[in-house]
Amino acid sequence: MCLGAECDHENVDRRAFLTGGAAALAGLAATGVAGADGEKKPPPTRVLDDPTIRHGKVAFKSGDKEIDGYLARPKAEGKYPAVLVVAGNLITEEYIPNTCAALAVAGYVGLAPNIFHPVPKGATPEGMNKALAGRTDDDYLRDIRAGGDYLKGHEAVKAGGVGILGFCSGGRRALLFAVKFDDVKAVVAFHPAAHTKPEEVVGLKVPVQIHHGEADRVSPSTVSRALEKQLRSQDTPVEVYLYEGAEHGFMAYTRHPEYKPDAAQEAWKRTVAFLDRSLKKK
C-alpha cells in the first residue's frame, strides 16, 4: 500500500505504479466484490456515494508552494474533529479519498494532503523515482503540517487538536509527525513501513493504534510488535491488532486479491472507536 521506494528504498516497481496511478482510476468501474450469485457488488468498505457527506479536492500553501489534497466532511452544518490521512501511495488511488469519506461518515473532517505532489501527472515509474529523489522526512512532514494548518482554519473543524492516520510509509510518518507536533491527539498506523524503527517513536505520548496483516510480505508484522514494545516501555497508550492471513493491501479495495473485506471492516470499526475515545470525549 505504498510506493516501492517508500516501502523499502528500492525503485518504484511496475505494480506499485499501476495500482497507485491512472490505471487504478481507470479500473474503478470494475471494482467490486463478487456475491454468492457471481454478480459484482460495491466493496463493503466503499462509502464515497454516502449521501450524508461531501468531498473533493482542495488546495493550500505548503511553504512557498501550493499543493492539493482531498477533503471530506459531513454535510450537516456544525464543527467536527479533524483527522489527517497520510498516504503511502498516490492519493489518486481511490481507497485514500474513500478513507477521508469514511471519516466523514463517522463524524470527522478527513484530509489527505498530497505529499507526493512533486510527481507529475502521467509519470512513469522511473519518472516518479526521479521526482521524489532527495525528498526527506522533513519535506513530507512540512506538507502534512500544511494540511493540519489548513484544517485548523476550516469552517467545519472543531478546535482542540487533530488525529492522524497513515498507511505504510504514511503510517511511519504519522508516528513521526505525532512525535514532533503537540497538537496531535491520537495516531492510527496501518502496517508501518518496513524501515520504521522503534527509536523513532521515543517521546511519543499520545494514544496509538496499530493494524497489521500477519501475511504482510512488504512490511512484516514484527515491525509493529517492535513499535509496541518501545511504546509500552515509555508508558504510551498503545493497541496493536494483527489480522490472520491479511496481506499488505488488506484495507485497499482497489487491490485484489489483497483486499480482505472482513479484516478491513473490523479494522475500521476499531479505528473509529479509538478516534471517538481520543477526539470526541467530553
Image: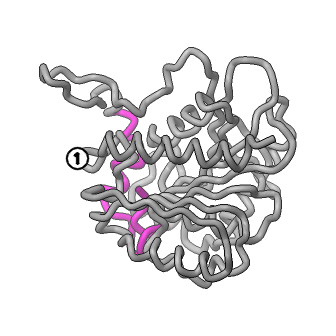
Identity of the residue drawn at 75% across and 56% down: 185
The three-letter amino acid code for the residue at tag 1 is Pro
In this picture, which residue range is highlighted in magenta? 1-26
Say which of 251 and 136 sits in front.
251
Q: By what rule are the colours in the image chosen?
A: one colour
93 to 230, vertically: above or below: above
Identity of the residue drawn at 30% across and 45% down: 260
> The residue tagged with tag 1: helix, strand or loop?
loop
13 to 137, vertically: above or below: above
* Residue 157, quarter of picture: top right
Mark 1, residues whose alpha carbon is within 10 Å: few (<14), some, or many (≥20)? few
Residue farthest top in this picture: 51
Note whether residue 132 is visible.
Answer: yes
Identity of the residue drawn at 84% across and 30% down: 155
Q: Quadrant of the N terminus?
A: bottom left
> Residue 16, percent across and down?
35, 56
> Residue 18, percent across and down?
33, 49
Note whether residue 128 is visible.
Answer: no
Does the magenta stretch mainly form a helix, a strand or a loop? helix
Identity of the residue drawn at 56% across and 59% down: 209
Q: Quadrant of the C terminus?
A: top right
Is 16 magenta? The answer is: yes
Give the labeled residue for mark 1: 257
> Residue 263, percent across and down?
35, 47
Left or right of 231? Residue 50 is: left
